[in-house]
Image (tube, rainbow, N blue to C red):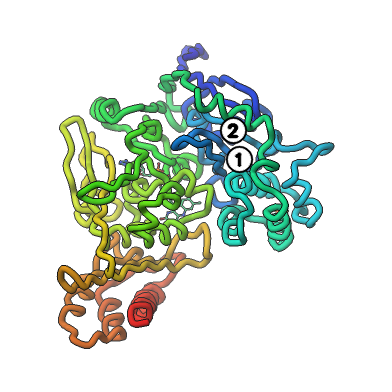
């Protein structure tokens, strides 16, 4: 740990070890530095661009590679939201590593040939997103390409030329020709990496946006730290927390990063249901065989959340703990009757998700407690489950309303509808369940109108109260068509 004396104020920064474009590096980092700030202010590498600084535009996209379940993954992330201390033991790949004006990388060459760049400001971000895609999938289809690029905005080209370049690349290339030899050379070092860092960066005044950034390796240590640091905030993917740092300029006395805890990264099928750990990202959920087989609607809702870069960092449990009434996964998790495992130094307890949301952004989490994992029962084969989200854009947009429905035929006939964006917390409609049970012939129009009358949604930039009520009706009618059809 490096200590610096400056005007009588002592700063204790941390040394991390990571790889940058094929070369091993060590860096001494203050607790609040993002990867983008490190590139610009410490390394003077300006190829990676900054536009929104809040995960919306993709201009700052870089790729990280690291071992996961016995293989090396290549993931696009937003460097503006990624704390630089998280890079310990990972390979950071930036636009500077991929090609040079004299020797373009095949992705840069294809964008050039298809006129996929004009002012060029967004181009490094598009190149890095395409690099992560083509390094991970052989010959991706159009759906894969759209998913990889939905987190990147371009003001100039109109996108078609970028998509043309991507399609040609996907025909002609596979990971063998896309991933440079210097990346492959680092992979063995990533597997065997075992250098320790106790990331305990802290500063002794409040000039910094984050005073202390602690990374933990096991749940026991996490519980201890939470009891000794009652003012600490947990950080998982940081896609909510770092927006507060960058945009709201919120000052955090202490962040505790849980992403180094191996036991929180598992998805497991057990007798009492499917367990999803607190550090499991949306992307991991979407790749999971267990989830694909038993909870396909969860994959559907993950696909509607943000864009690829955010899904590579953001976690489902982060969405729950953030407790926004418009957290998109929450209606579906409510109708799955999800249970939370809450842990602290005192032990563990289980709580139903429906009892977790107390009031607007207030949860039942006690001081010193954290969410360790969630448990979802496997639904019966013939249970009807669906979910919907209404937003102005298809990708990277917060919803006006979201909803999920469940209709069970066994062991007893029952129905449940949950909604987000219509009240201070995500809610289960009482009207829907009781009316459904009382109807011999299901009248979806009546169900829709009665449920809309149950709520008095707020008006905001995403929609008026009337608009939201109409969306409730539309969602339910859509469910009716799908159920009957
Ligand atoms: C550009 C952009 C687009 C987005 N789009 C969407 C969208 O379409 N739909 C949507 O719902 N959300 C969206 N989000 C919000 C965000 O990505 C999600 O809420 C995500 O699930 C947060 O997960 P995280 O791991 O990044 O959380 P973090 O930012 O790390 O944490 C979020 C909150 O949860 C707490 N927390 C995290 N883990 C735990 C734990 N184990 N126990 C207790 N507390 C914990 C943290 O202290 C913090 O208060 C978007 C965000 C951005 C920046
Ligand atoms: S600068 Fe826009 S996503 Fe990071
Ligand atoms: S080429 Fe100008 S923003 Fe994309």
Residue beneath the point at 37% across and 30% down = 254
Depth order, front residue of 207/277: 277
Are there few (<14), some (14-19), or many (20+) residues within 10 Å of tag 1? many
Element type at mark 2: strand
Can I make out residue 297 in this image? yes
> Under 8 Å from ligand 2: the CB of mark 1?
no
> Under 8 Å from ligand 2: the CB of mark 2?
no
- In the rendered image, the vertical position of residue 259 relative to residue 408, given as above or below: above
Depth order, front residue of 25/357: 25
Relative placement, left or right, of 111 versus 302 is: right
Name which of mark 1 and mark 2 comes first in the sequence. 1
Q: Percent x, y for residue 233?
A: 34, 36
- In the rendered image, the vertical position of residue 57 relative to residue 186, given as above or below: below
Q: Do the residues labelled 1 and 2 touch (CB within 8 Å)?
A: yes
Q: Percent x, y for residue 456?
A: 29, 72
Q: Mark 1 points at which residue?
A: 62
Q: Percent x, y for residue 374?
A: 27, 47
Residue beneath the point at 39% across and 59% down = 328
**The C terminus lies in quadrant:** bottom left
Can I make out residue 255 in this image? no
Q: Percent x, y for residue 234?
A: 35, 36
Which residue is at the far right? 102
Are there few (<14), some (14-19), or many (20+) residues within 10 Å of tag 2? many
Q: Name the residue under label 2.
A: 92
Residue beneath the point at 32% across and 61% down = 332
């Amino acid at each position: 740990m490096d200590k610096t004396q400056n005007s009588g104020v002592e700063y204790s920064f941390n040394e991390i070890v990571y790889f940058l474009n094929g070369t091993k590096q060590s860096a001494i980092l203050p607790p609040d530095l993002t990867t983008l700030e490190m590139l610009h202010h410490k390394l003077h590498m300006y190829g990676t661009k900054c536009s929104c600084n809040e995960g919306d535009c993709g201009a700052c996209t870089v790729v990280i590679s690291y071992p996961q379940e016995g293989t090396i993954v290549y993931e696009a992330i937003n460097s503006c939201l990624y704390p630089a201390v998280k890079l310990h033991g990972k390979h950071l790949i930036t636009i500077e590593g991929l090609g040079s004006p004299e020797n373009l990388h095949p992705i840069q060459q294809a964008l050039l040939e298809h006129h996929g760049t004009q002012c060029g400001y967004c181009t490094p971000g598009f190149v890095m997103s395409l690099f992560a895609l083509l390094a991970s999938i052989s010959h991706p289809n159009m759906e894969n390409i759209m998913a990889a690029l939905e987190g990147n905005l371009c003001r100039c080209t109109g996108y078609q030329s970028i998509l043309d370049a991507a399609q040609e690349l996907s025909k002609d290339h596979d990971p063998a020709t896309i991933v440079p030899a210097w990346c492959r050379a680092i992979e063995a070092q990533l597997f065997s990496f075992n250098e320790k860092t106790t990331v305990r960066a802290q500063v002794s005044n409040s000039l910094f946006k984050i005073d202390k950034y602690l990374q933990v390796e096991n749940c026991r240590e996490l519980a201890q730290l939470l009891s000794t640091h009652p003012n600490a905030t947990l950080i998982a993917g940081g896609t909510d927390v770092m927006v507060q740092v960058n945009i709201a300029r919120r000052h955090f006395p202490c962040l505790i990063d849980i992403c180094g805890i191996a036991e929180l990264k598992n998805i497991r099928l057990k007798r009492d249901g499917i367990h999803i750990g607190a550090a499991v990202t949306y992307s991991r959920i979407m790749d999971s065989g267990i989830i694909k087989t038993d909870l396909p609607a969860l994959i559907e809702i993950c696909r509607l959340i943000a864009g690829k870069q955010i899904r590579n960092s953001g976690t489902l449990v982060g969405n729950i703990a953030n407790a926004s009434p418009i957290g998109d996964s929450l209606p579906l998790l409510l109708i799955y009757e999800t249970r939370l495992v809450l842990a602290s130094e005192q032990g563990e307890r289980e709580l139903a998700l429906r009892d977790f949301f107390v009031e607007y952004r207030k949860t039942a989490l006690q001081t010193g407690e954290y969410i360790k994992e969630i448990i979802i029962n496997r639904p019966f084969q013939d249970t009807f489950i669906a979910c919907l989200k209404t937003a102005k854009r298809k990708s990277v947009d917060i919803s006006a309303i979201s909803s999920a429905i469940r209709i069970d035929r066994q062991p007893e006939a029952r129905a449940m509808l949950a909604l987000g964006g219509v009240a201070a917390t995500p809610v289960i409609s009482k009207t829907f369940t009781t009316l459904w049970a009382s109807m011999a012939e299901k009248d979806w129009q009546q169900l829709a109108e009665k449920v809309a009358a149950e709520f008095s949604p707020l008006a905001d930039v995403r929609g008026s109260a009337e608009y939201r009520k109409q969306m409730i009706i539309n969602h339910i009618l859509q469910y009716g068509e799908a159920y009957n059809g």
